[in-house]
Image (cartoon, helix red, strand yellow):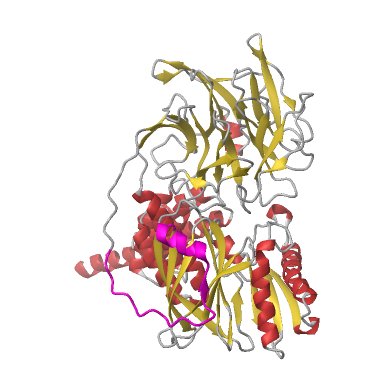
Amino acid sequence: MKSLFFTALFTLALLSSGSYAQTTKDLVAKGDQLYSKKNYAAALDNFLKAYEINPDDASVNFKVGLAYLYSDTKSKAAAYIDKAYRLNPKVHDDIDYHLGIAFQNTNNFKKAMEHFEDFKRKKKNLASIADEKIAECIMADSLAENELNITIENLGTVINTNFSEYAPILSADGNTLIFTSNRSDNEARVKAGANFEDIYMSTREGKGWSTPKKISENINTDKYNEAAASLSPDGKTLFLYSEEGAGDIHISTLEGGVWSKPVPLNKNINTGMFWETSATLSPDGKKLYFTSNRDGGYGELDIYVSQLDAKGQWGKAVNLGPTINTPEDEDSPFIHADGVTLYFSSNGHRRLGNSDIFFSELKGNKWTKPENIGYPINSWEYDGFFSISPDKKKAYYSTVKEGGSGGTDIYSISFFEPKYKPKPKPVVVAAAPAPVKKKDDFVAAFIEVQKQKKVVTILKGKVIDELTAEPLAATISLVDNQTNTVVTKISTDETTGDFELTIPHGGNYGVTTDKAGYLFNSINFNLPAFAEYQEIDTHIIMVKAEIGSKVVLKNIFFDPRKTELKTESVAEVEKIKELLLGNPSLRVQINGHTDNMELSASGNAESYKALSLKRASAVIGYLSSQGIDSKRLSAKGYGMERPIVSNDDEESGREINRRTEIEIIQ
């Protein structure tokens, strides 16, 4: 009997084990399928169920972490990816990169930098990418160290719901709040994802707000999304976005307590084929700042300004230029009551996370370099639609925070006197012997001035061979990409390969390293004026100039979906010309690569290849125009076929995969 009992137990254990394994496999497979469709919430649900069955499965922990990394609760990602790493450091080839991103999104910059350093050691061909991420962490850490003296408060469940609320607009007297929400009590529409965004209004009641109501049946429709944009100082003209048409800016006026049916602005503002999303009216009512993704911009959404003419019509839209606009999105502009301070959101300027809030001042006819408004207003999540009172003591914005009601919520910010924290004493480290200066080495005078003021980044380290790690004597040049001029040239130590390069803040700079017999190394630094003094230790890795050798050109720039070389690329292409002139027998191929989303849903594999080939050909065209024999040049467009890292990393992975390379073919 005893033998029969244990035999039955053993059989039951085998059956249970088989059922468990099958269940885990099914859950992970279902989660993978949903993840590939970007349904991260549903994927996460399946991965978490698999995690409950076996919490010590490294692969499941990694998948849970990645799903969190693309959800509204990014801060939970690090714990799972870190656990996966501890269970099996080889669970994924790029786990150090993903773990670095996860720690970066939780403001644990020290750990993030450690993993980016590990990623750099393991993936030497991606060292420059890791260095850029490390530089971002250093900048973010400096913002966190200088935390703003503010309080941030959720407006509560009267205003915020488990849907998204955003674009808060406060009337001049502070007693009326207009905002946008996609809330709905129609379960069928919600389930189908067909619930529309509408504009709501609430009035102040004591220290709180009244229950919001839809602003007007004349404004909100059952067919399109509508979103609040700006309110005139007298509170009688509302600028709003309507999805009707291509997505345009409309106005509605308040007459006798009733909002009129919205009317689209003229063709100087709205375009027939492009998207106009947000707008803000200057305090004198004569300038309209708005966003559009029309042709001729510097990137995706750009900020434009239009002036009211003598006939009361909006004039030709003028792009605010590359100081404000980047190759990415600039959105939700707000012009302050002073008429010269512009606040806006951006995912193109150096930032803490998904999208940060920046400000710039109009001095004369020029906008100052945008400054990050700071931490903790900006976080690793989305931050946007910022507006602030005339005295700059009270502000409202939309953000995603854990503990909120769901989606984006509206928060208020109260500003107090700045905190003055004593700066930590610098750690004294014995300096390495300075490299011997060659007679043609130089540093521009303005850089020395900036260095004395400590508004610079010090890049220091060694130049080494890719395969042997032996130190190299090389020449390092710092190029101002805006003017295409060399502002610094230094030589590394001939014995140790050591160097120290000073990079001033407030510009876009290329760092190129040259060594006879090697392909030149290329790094890009886009340093905001607000950055703290910082020092970055790195290794510059050099690849020998042999058939099959290739390197990424970090200072070749194209606007999204465009194929024309930007002027900031000229200095880098000139380096290719120098390489070819110095090596008359050399033949090179320029390789173009894209991510898998640059052309959005309209693109297929062939259109991506065509885009990347045209970009590579643009580099060839420049070199040919400069006298390089076209027989020594060829172009290849790979499109999205050869990603370096996963395109699932929507912010950084795709940026890495959009690249131009030089490859030696003879």
* Quadrant of the rendering where the N terminus is positioned: bottom left
Measured from the top left, where is residue 375 in percent x and y? 40, 45
Residue nearest the viewer, comparing 422 with 219: 422
In the displayed structure, 386 sits above or below 9; it is: above
Please state if 50 lies on the left or on the right of 166 as rendered.
Answer: left
The quadrant where residue 231 appears: top right
Quadrant housing the C terminus: bottom right
Q: Is residue 654 above or below residue 515?
A: above
Residue lying furthest left in this view? Answer: 2
**Residue 148 to residue 134: above or below:** above
Q: Is residue 89 left or right of residue 361?
A: left
Name which quarter of the figure residue 432 lies in: bottom left
Tell which residue pokes out farthest to the bottom in this image: 585
**Residue 285 shown left or right of residue 205 in the figure:** right
Residue 593 visible (yes or no): no
Could you tell me which residue is drawn at 77 percent across and 36 percent down? 268
| Prevailing secondary structure class for the magenta stretch in the rendered image | loop
Say which residue appears at 36% left-offset and 36% top-offset.
Answer: 150
Q: Position of residue 508 (x, y in %)?
A: 57, 60
Q: Give the farthest residue toward the top.
A: 256
Say whether residue 443 is magenta: yes
Give the extent of the magenta segment. Answer: 427-455
State the residue at coordinates (79%, 34%): 267
Answer whether residue 52 is visible to the viewer in this image: yes
Residue 74, horizontal then vertical, whole percent: 43, 50
The tally of labels here is 0
Q: Position of residue 402 (x, y in %)?
A: 40, 41
The verdict on residue 27 being magenta is no
Tell which of 657 and 224 is nearer to you.
657
Q: Residue at x 38, y 38 (%)?
A: 403
Q: Is residue 630 left or right of residue 189?
A: right
